[in-house]
């Protein structure tokens, strides 16, 4: 199933503008167009191959050390009760006209209140916003969406159906289907990327923009090739370009990679009182262990190199950017650089000792910062 896009901000432009200001960029820019393109894609696929080889070595070692455990998976057929907690909201579904896809979301708060739309990252789903669903429902209609390919939302099989153009139009049509013309838009990680793009392409839809743990897309695409340390931290972007193998790696040792992302000392949630309970972890494992549940999320990444960077850059609504001081995936220097593209009020808050999973790691602080930003009299609007 394919989708057309009526986005005014077509995202597919030359990949060559990824490298301004960098010595590699100066070299590449001096080459003829066809050679510049060849140099760029050689770099992309070489790093993809390097990441794949590293993953293969890890898999081989796992098979040698624990052959029986490597491919053993725990059956997960019963939905964890936390996913049906009525205090989090109501499970709803909407089928959008353009693509025909059915989307799942959880909604809390009265209909008719201003809309707060929450976009999760990878590898997450609506449940990553559980603390915000409880917190903001008294003043907002809070909607935590499962993005295309995630959770109970439909997952087209073809990777071309996950282009960023299509994802942006998904969100626009969902907003229309919910009966709203504008919202407070909040995105984390990959959902933050989408939130930035919606704010750029459809500024009339967004009264206030709040992004967690992801810089402006232009900052990201320029920074990543100027700074080898960030290139290494973003190695999974390249690894995910491979067909089927990343899906396999995520299932090894009963989804150990997924578990470690949220629980390990290096990348996991830092605050002791907010660490995943056993039931929280089972909720994630239940969602991502369903047949085909990993391909949709990974297909989002398999389109990124054809869609960035942008032709249009400016963000015109008040913007709050939240960042974890100990984020293992994105360097904090990108947060300050994002200020360049904010043409309205811009607030950056870096949370001490916080990980990448901000809204789950420091929910009280994140919620307080969001409330302060939303209630600032300078930016109050009639929603």
Image (cartoon, helix red, strand yellow):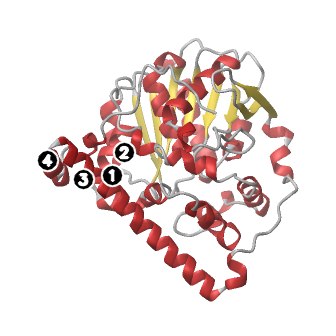
Q: Which residue is mark 3?
A: 39
First in residue order: circle 1 vs circle 4: 4
Mark 4 Cα shell of 10 Å, populated few (<14), some (14-19), many (≥20)? few
Q: Residue at x 58, y 11 (%)?
A: 382
State yes or no: discs 2 and 1 in contact (Cβ < 8 Å): yes
- Give the quadrant of the C terminus: top right
Q: Which residue is mark 4?
A: 31
CA separation, marks 3 and 1?
16 Å
Q: Which residue is mark 1?
A: 224
Q: Residue furthest left?
A: 30
Coordinates of residue 288 in the picture (x, y in percent): 70, 55
First in residue order: circle 3 vs circle 2: 3
Mark 2 Cα shell of 10 Å, populated few (<14), some (14-19), many (≥20)? many
Q: Which residue is mark 2?
A: 220
CA separation, marks 1 and 4?
21 Å
Q: Secondary structure at mark 2?
A: helix
* Res 10 quadrant in image: top left
Q: Residue furthest top?
A: 382
Q: Residue at x 28, y 51 (%)?
A: 40
Q: Is residue 269 visible?
A: no
State yes or no: discs 4 and 3 in contact (Cβ < 8 Å): yes
């Amino acid at each position: 199933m394919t989708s057309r896009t009526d986005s005014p901000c077509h995202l597919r432009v030359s990949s060559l503008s990824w490298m301004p200001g960098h010595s590699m960029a100066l070299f590449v820019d001096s080459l003829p167009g066809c050679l510049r393109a060849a140099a760029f894609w050689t770099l992309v696929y070489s790093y993809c191959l390097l990441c794949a080889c590293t993953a293969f070595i890890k898999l081989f070692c796992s098979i040698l050390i624990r052959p029986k455990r490597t491919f053993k998976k725990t059956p997960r057929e019963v939905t964890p009760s936390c996913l049906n907690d009525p205090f989090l909201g109501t499970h709803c579904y909407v089928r959008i006209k353009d693509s025909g896809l059915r989307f799942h979301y959880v909604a809390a708060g009265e209909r008719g209140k201003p809309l707060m739309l929450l976009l999760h990252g990878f590898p997450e789903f609506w449940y990553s916003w559980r603390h915000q669903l409880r917190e903001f429902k008294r003043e907002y209609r809070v909607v935590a969406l499962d993005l295309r390919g995630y959770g109970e939302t439909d997952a087209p099989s073809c990777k071309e159906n996950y282009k960023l153009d299509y994802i942006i139009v998904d969100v626009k049509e969902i907003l229309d289907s919910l009966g709203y013309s504008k919202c407070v838009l909040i995105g984390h990680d990959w959902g933050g990327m989408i939130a930035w793009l919606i704010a750029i392409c459809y500024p009339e839809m967004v009264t206030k923009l709040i992004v967690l743990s992801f810089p402006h897309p232009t900052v990201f695409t320029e920074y990543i090739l100027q700074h080898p340390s960030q290139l290494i931290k973003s190695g999974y972007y390249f690894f995910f370009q491979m067909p089927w193998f990343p899906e396999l790696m995520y299932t090894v040792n009963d989804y150990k990679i997924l578990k470690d992302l949220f629980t390990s000392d290096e990348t996991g949630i830092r605050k002791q009182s907010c660490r995943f309970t056993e039931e929280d972890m089972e909720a994630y494992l239940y969602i991502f262990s369903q047949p085909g549940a990993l391909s949709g999320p990974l297909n989002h990444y398999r389109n990124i190199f054809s869609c960035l960077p942008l032709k249009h850059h400016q963000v015109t609504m008040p913007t709050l950017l939240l960042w974890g001081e100990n984020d293992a995936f994105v360097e904090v220097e990108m947060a300050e650089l994002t200020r360049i593209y904010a043409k309205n009020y811009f607030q950056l808050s870096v949370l001490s000792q916080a990980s990448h999973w901000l809204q789950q790691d420091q929910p009280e602080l994140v919620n307080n910062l969001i409330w302060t930003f939303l209630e600032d009299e300078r930016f109050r609007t009639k929603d």
